[in-house]
Each structure stands twice: as C-alpha cells, then as structure tokens.
Image (tube, rainbow, N blue to C red):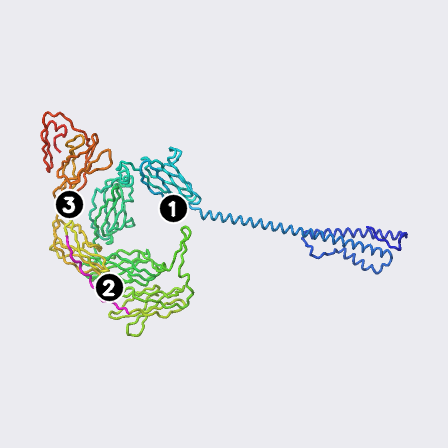
Amino acid sequence: MTLPHSLGSTGDPRPPQTMEVHRLEHRQEEERKEERQHSLHMGSSVRRHTFRSSEEEHEFSAADYALAAALALTASSELSWEAQLRRQTSAVELEERGQKRVGFGNDWERTEIAFLRTHRLLRQRRNWKMLRQRTEEKVQEAKELRELCSGRGPWFWIPLRSHAVWEHTTVLLTCTVQASPPPQVTWYKNDTRIDPRLFPAGKYRITNNYGLLSLEIRRCTIEDSATYTVRVKNAYGQASSFAKVLVCTYLGKDAGFDSEIFKRSMFGPSVEFTSVLKPVFAREKEPFSLSCLFSEDVLDAESIQWFRDGRLLRSSRRRKILYADCQASLKVSCTYKEDEGLYTVQVPSPFGPREQSTYVLVRDAEAENPGAPGSPLNVRCLDVNRDCLILTWAPPSDTRGNAITAYSIERCQGDSGEWVPCHEAPGGTCRCPIQGLVEGQSYRFRVRAISKAGSSLPSKASELVVMGDHDAARRKTEIPFGLGNKITISTDDFEDTVTIPSPPTNVHASEIREAYVVLAWEEPRPRGRAPLTYSLEKSVIGSGTWEAISTESPVKSPRFAVLNLEKKKSYVFRVRAMNQYGLSDPSEPSEPIALPGQPATLPPPAQVQAFRDTQTSVTLTWDPVKDPELLGYYIYSREVGSSEWQTVNNKPIQGTRFTVPGLRTGKEYEFCVRSVSEAGVGESSAATEPIRVKQALATPSAPYGFALLNCGKNEMVIGWKPPKRRGGGKILGYFLDQHDSEELDWHAVNQQPIPTRVCKVSDLREGHFYEFRARAANWAGVGELSAPSSLFECKEWTMPQPGERPPVRCTVGAPIVYGSWACHRLSRQFPGGRL
C-alpha cells in the first residue's frame, strides 16, 4: 500500500525514533489486519453454515470496535505530523477495508442468492419426484385393486346347447364365457381332449373371440355323435359346459331322438315294476314302510321320487328314502295323521316315467282315557306378528261318542321340549288367537281335544315360527348393483325425529268370529324411530263412554284380538299410539262391530254313491259342499247289520271321489260322508245302498310257452300257452310282438286281438333270428306282457314228402293244441306234436 505524503514534509529526513515507531505501528497494523481477516473468514464460515441471507445486517468484529475506540480517544491528543499521518493512514485503510468489505458482501450476497435459488430448485425437484413417486404408488395400488376386484372365476353367460344334425353336415357349438383374467380353454369329446392336430386337416376348428368360444365339426359322421364338453380355468376357478351332438342318418329308427340308442343313452335301461304297492293300515305313533321292486338296477338312485298327495317327499329325521338291490323303500319311524294320503313312487324310463300308487291310512292310537276323542291334526300358525298369531287345526274324525267341549292349546318355546298350556278354545271352533308372545322368540304349538271322557293325545306339533315384524319387509327396498351386490333402503331410515306420535288410522275388524274380534290398524305417519306400543279402548253403541281394554303385556303389533265381548251388542273401538315421549290422541272410531251368532253346521254331502272296484275295495263319489271354510271330508263305513260306524280316513279328503281299501270279500257294506270345516264336523249324509264286495274282473296274466309250429322263407307260425290267471273273465284275444335280433325295436304283429293262440307272421327276412312276446286281453283290459321267447331262425323247413300232405287239424281254444301230418315227419319238426 502507498501512503500519501504531506506537502510540508517532502524531502525532510526522518529521525530514527520516528521510523522505529512507524515500523512498530505497521507491525501492529499487520497483526490487527491478520486478526480481522481471520475474523472475517470465521464470520464467512459461520454465515455459510447458517445460510445467512444478504438482507441480514452485517456485524463488525470485536477488534474493529476496539480499533475504532482507540482511534477516537487518541484523535484529540495527537497533534504531531506522525499522529496526522497515522490518522490519514488509518482512514485510508478503513476506507479500503470498507470497500473490500462491501465488495465481499456483494459477492457473498450473489453467491447466497444463487445458492438459495439452487436450493429451491432442488427442493422443487425433490418434491416433484416424491409427488411422482406417490402418484405411481397410488396408480399401482388402484391397478392392483382393480385387478383384485375384477379377478373372478369363469362362468358361462350362454352355455352350450345340444344339436341334432344330418350326416355329412357341419355343426357349430358356441358358448359365451366371462372371466378375469382370460381363462384357458380346453374342449373334450366324451372326456377325451380334442387336439385338431391329431385329426384330418379341417375336421375341427376351435376359436376364442373375446369370450365367444366355438367348436366347428365339419362333415359329421356317426362317430361324431358324442357329448362335447368345454372346460375353462383361470387362477380364480374353473367351469364347464357340455352338449350332446346326435348325427342322424337316413335309417330313421337307428338315429334321432326317437331311436332306442338315444333313449337308452339318456335314460338308461328300461325299468319296470316287478311288485305292486299294496294299501298300508298304520297306527298313530307307530312306524310303517312302503317298498317296491324293479326289473333293472336304477343307475341314479336319486331319480326315484316319492310323492304324497302330489307333493314331493324328501328324507328327514323322521322319514327315510332308501334304495338297494333293485328295491326302493320309504320308511317312517313315527306316524302321525298328517302322514295319511295317496303315496306314489316314480322312476324314469326311456318310454316315460313309470309309477305306482297306493293309499296309507292312519288309525288313531289308543287313548289315555277310555272314551276320549282322537287327536286333532294339521296345526298351523297364520298371520304371525311381533307378539301374536292365529292358530288353526282340523277336528278329529272320531270322537268316540262324546262331543268335544273344548280344545287345550300347549306351546313350547324354542327347542326346550317343555310344553305348557297357554290357552283354551271352545269346542265349536278350530281357530284361536294366541297373544302375549315375545318378539324374537321361536314357538311350536300342539292341541288336545277335550270331552267329558277326558283329554285326547296331543296332536303333531306345528312348524317352528319366529315372532317378528313381518311387515318390515314391505318397508324395505333392495337396489342391486355390480355383480351380486345390493343396497337395502328402509323407509325407517328417512323417519324424522318425532316426539309425541300421531294417532293410528284405519281401525277396522280384520276377522270376526263367534268368540273374538281381531282388530287391525295402520301405524301413525310419520311414525318416528322410537318403538311404538298401543292401547285400545271400546265403547258400546249408545253408551257415550269409553272403556280401556286391559292387556297382560304391551301391544306391539298393529293387530289385537278382543275377547269376552257380549253378543247382541255393537261395539266401536279406537287406538292410541305411545312411545317414550308420551301418548298420542285417540284415533277415529271404527265402524260398529258385533259378534255373529253360532255358525251353522255344514250341510251333508249329497248323491253319495258306491261302486264295486276290486275284490277288496269300493269306490265312493258324492257332490261337493260349497263352503269357503271347507277343509275336506270324512268317510265312515259299517257292515250291514251293525249299528257302529267305523272311521275310514283320519285326514280330510280334498276331492269328491275315494276308493275304500281293505274290505272283506263277500261282506255287505254301507257308507256315509261328512264334511269338515274350522267349525267342526258337519252332519252325516244318508247311508248308501248296501253293496256286496265280491271278486271283480282283473286283467289276465302273461302268456307263456312260445313255440315255432312252421317256418317258410319269410314267414313263421307261432303258438303259445294261455295265461295262468284269466282275471275272472273270458280271454277275448291276444296281441303279438316280434323282434329281429339285429335290431333294437320291437314291432307289433297285429293291431286287432287274435282270438286263437296261433299266429302266422309274414314279411320276415330269411336267415334272421326272431323272438316273440304276447299279451292277453279280457273285458278288464290288456294284461301283462310276457317274457320274450327263444330265438327262432327264419329258415324254410325242407323234408321228403312221400305223398300228398294231409290237412292240418288244430284244436283252437283248448289248453293243448294238436297238429298232425304224418307222425314220423312231425316228430322231426316239433317233437311230440304238442305245445
């Protein structure tokens, strides 16, 4: 650094002391300069570390403040030229230092601004990268969720369908499948995988066009008749669909849906009954069984079905349906009156279902008290609500001479097995309201009939019922969406908060009986979300006063049965609604309601007629009784000369025709019919004319003993023996069938009955083997089909003829037919000459 010189001191020599002081001060200034540089360096390091911006105030170091203070103290005392020189030198240095300091601050500010800008850009880039990473993660999660939601096993929107085509034509099997991810598709022919490479070129063509699967079979032959299956599979499951392809030819009977091959392939072998179902007379509380035999083994035992009065039966804890060794059976471990009815067993067959029917009659069990009536039946629960229901039943057919005075009703809660009496109904009705039940609980009921002789056995228990608000289903709406999902919306969700409810509306009588009235009403609107109970009031017409109807428990359902009303009086009713906030105003009064008188007894059925059916049964018919509450009819019988009527059926019959089984041949019987309703058993009809049970006509048994009497090039003469059982009448004729061993179908030989037991069959093929079967007919109808005969070859009989052939003499109609040519010739063709 060059110091300025004073004008007055130019050229003057400096004394040694002054030079020494100057060097000392210069050394001190250098030391202080190094300290300031070190301080500035340390300050810059600190500022760089803390990222101090240029807008912040610059601070001087402690050495700067000390130097400034020293200069200020010595400024006034030093007046020599050395002091002035030092002051000038310090000012110049301070000025230069300030300039350098300002320049260093500007550079640092620019550097800091660039650093902050770079830091901001890096932060933005980091934020963008993180945002992009989060976006990619969310997209990946959404993709995985979409794949997870869309991933499902395959299922067929449109399955395969069977085809019947002509030979040398093309058939196309198509189906539509939906799956995610796309499934793997495999085609099979009779469980053998189809590989188009293993067949002639163009025989099979398999395509998969976005779920539309197709299999094209070109130039079909008889070998292409098979069951074709397509199986699809992915990671979520698999599915299959199959169809049958039937290739028809010009032969007609050897192909098509009417062919024997197709029927046997679809339904299996022809199954016939080899035994007859017979009527069963069971007793209440005891077991019974039904069984029948088949000619062939049924491939699918589940195809055998049992019915009672037209309703399909299934196995249960009390009823078992079994099949073993060509025998189907139905076993009931504990019998009730409800098990009575017409039982039918049905088995499939290529020519239509085969079935047999019989009637099962259930007699009353021994009463605990002698003379007590039989047990009621058909106990049912109707109009089930939150705390009440209506119980109905059918009266017993046999009161054992004592009128029923009352019915005792018992209930069992859940599966406890504990039966407790809950109500007693008068004897003139079979319908009763049950109240005071608990919502959410399950109940069963049974009924006993009471007479002066005592109480009957309990009836079969009713089905289990659960008490609840069954009207709540009408207040709910289901909205489907997606695949198998749905949203349930209830009108209760839209109810506002209601404090005191509004009064109910539309109070009316839903049922009026001679012992009670069932009141019904509509809930208040708006209803509110708080639970509601109801209180009822009644008033006699003309009294002007209202009386509260006492109840044992709060009424929760919009229905209530009012008991203990006086007859010949008219009543009006009103209802109040109550919740946790208070009681509503009374509703509008109902219309006047009065109890009816004693119900009229049902009239007896008219025009009861009896017809002899078989040697042990009689068929009855009668005119129906027109009554809306009719439950059916009871039938009674007695032998001529006896004064006691016996019950035929213990379960009311719905129709107007019934066959009474189990009668004794040679006895005379009378019959009468009584109608049944909820009011009890009606009056008896007039007794029928006495009818004697005797052996009636039946269809004959099957012929047997077929033999070949003569044979030509294309004709045969067949003979056979008469049936062992003629059915009590004369044989009117026979029907003969033939069968070529090289064919599958049987063909009728004659359309009109043949009066003799010899038949000439023409239009046969020489060299073929034939078998025959026949059926006999009488006035009762066509009898049983015989077993097939032995195979007879259609080959002309040739033998030397010594002379003119004598005429053949046949005796027709006798058990034995004799024919004669010359005895030595006949012995070769038909040994003995006798059938």
Q: Three-letter amino acid code at disc 3? A: Ala
Mark 2: give few (<14), some (14-19) or many (20+) Cα within 10 Å.
Answer: some
| Quarter where residue 447 is shown | bottom left
Q: Main secondary structure of the magenta part?
A: loop
**Vertical position of residue 521 compared to residue 120: above or below:** below
Residue type at the position of mark 2: Pro
Label 2 vs label 3, nearer the camera: 3
Amino acid beneath label 1: Trp
Q: Which residue is mark 3?
A: 780
Q: Is residue 504 above or below residue 54?
A: below
Return the x and y of residue 545 as percentages of the image width and height: 31, 74
- The residue shown at (15%, 31%) is 710
Name the N-terminal-most of marks 2 and 3. 2
The circle drawn on residue 426 is 2
Res. 397 image quadrant? bottom left
Dot 2 falls on a residue whose secondary structure is: strand
Q: Position of residue 323 (x, y in %)?
A: 27, 43
Q: Residue at x 12, y 29 (%)?
A: 826
Q: Is residue 370 visible?
A: no
Helix, strand or loop status at disc 3? loop
Label 1's element?
strand
The range drawn in magenta is 592-610
Q: Which residue is mark 1?
A: 157
Instruction: Report x, y in % for residue 743.
Output: 24, 35
The answer to which of marks 1 and 2 sits earlier in the sequence is: 1
Q: Name which residue lies at 31% across and 72% down.
A: 547
